[in-house]
Image (cartoon, rainbow, N blue to C red):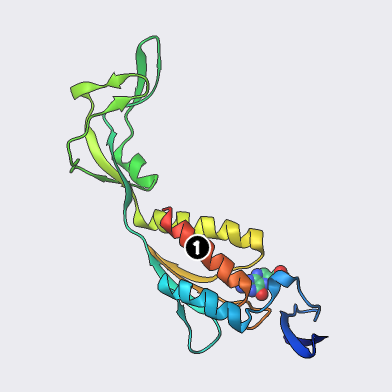
Amino acid sequence: MAAAVGVRGAGRWLVALRCRGASGAAMSSDAQWLTPEERSQLIPDLKAAGWSELSERDAIYKEFSFKNFNQVCLCVRAFCVGMVTGHAWCLQPSEEDLRSSGIIVTDDCEPPCQCWGPNLGLLGGAAGAITTSTSPALAAFGFMSRVALQAEKMNHHPEWFNVYNKVQITLTSHDCGGLSKRDVKLAQFIEKAAASR
Ligand SMILES: C[C@H](O)[C@H](O)[C@H]1CNC2=NC(N)=NC(=O)C2=N1
């Protein structure tokens, strides 16, 4: 899978390790294994962020857990979508509509929220308010979607497992049979994606 390429320079042997694809052709420099120096520089940062090294193979692992987020008060009795000449169109989405869009509906608006229509001002007492938040499962899916797009862009894919709000991720480079710079780059992206949820 991997080949050691010796280069004679300045009286000593410099060794660069490259990963090889299925055809046996050396892959781009981006596909190189991590050098020992890079490992000692980059892996501690990832460990500090919660990644661990697997004992059974050269890979890193982290579990992400998602909670409710985007808690906002939403007007449901008068959910106004626009205004023309002083009149707002008010929809009345059912709880079922909201739930099927991944919105959690509870009755505990805290603090009591006021309902505002776009360009309209306070809608007043006619509008009922509920607390809403996106479901943890949907938060996990959103995170996975962002990671999946990046993985496609890099042509480098995580091994992952998702149940409800948990996403377990293992990163390794199959063509290298171990960690490469691509794993570090993807792990760094994953950290950002998890932080921006
Ligand atoms: C053919 C395709 O380019 C390869 O199979 C890519 C796809 N994604 C990959 N992802 C990972 N993690 N390792 C790889 O070696 C790899 N190779």
Is residue 11 positioned above or below 172 on the image?
below
Residue 102: x percent and y percent? 38, 48
89, 42: nearer the viewer: 42
Residue located 27% across and 44% down the image: 105
Classify residue 183 by image quadrant: bottom right
Residue located 54% across and 87% down the image: 57
Q: Quadrant of ligand 1?
A: bottom right
Is residue 12 positioned above or below 111 on the image?
below
For label 1, the crowd category at 10 Å Cα-Cα, with few meaning under 14, some 14 to 19 and many 20 or more, is many
Secondary structure, mark 1, is helix
Image side of residue 188 versus residue 117, left or right:
right
Q: How many marks?
A: 1
Residue 152: x percent and y percent? 64, 60
Residue located 59% across and 77% down the image: 38
Image side of residue 63 versus residue 12, left or right:
left
Residue 178 in sight here: no
Can you identify the residue that label 1 sits on?
190
Residue 62: x percent and y percent? 44, 73
Residue, far front: 10
Q: Quadrant of the N terminus?
A: bottom right
Image side of residue 109 versus residue 158, left or right:
left
133, 153: nearer the viewer: 153
Residue 161: x percent and y percent? 47, 70
Classify residue 64 by image quadrant: bottom left
As shown in the figure, which amino acid type bears the numbered disc 1? Ile
Residue located 48% across and 89% down the image: 55
Residue 183 in sight here: yes
161, 38: nearer the viewer: 38
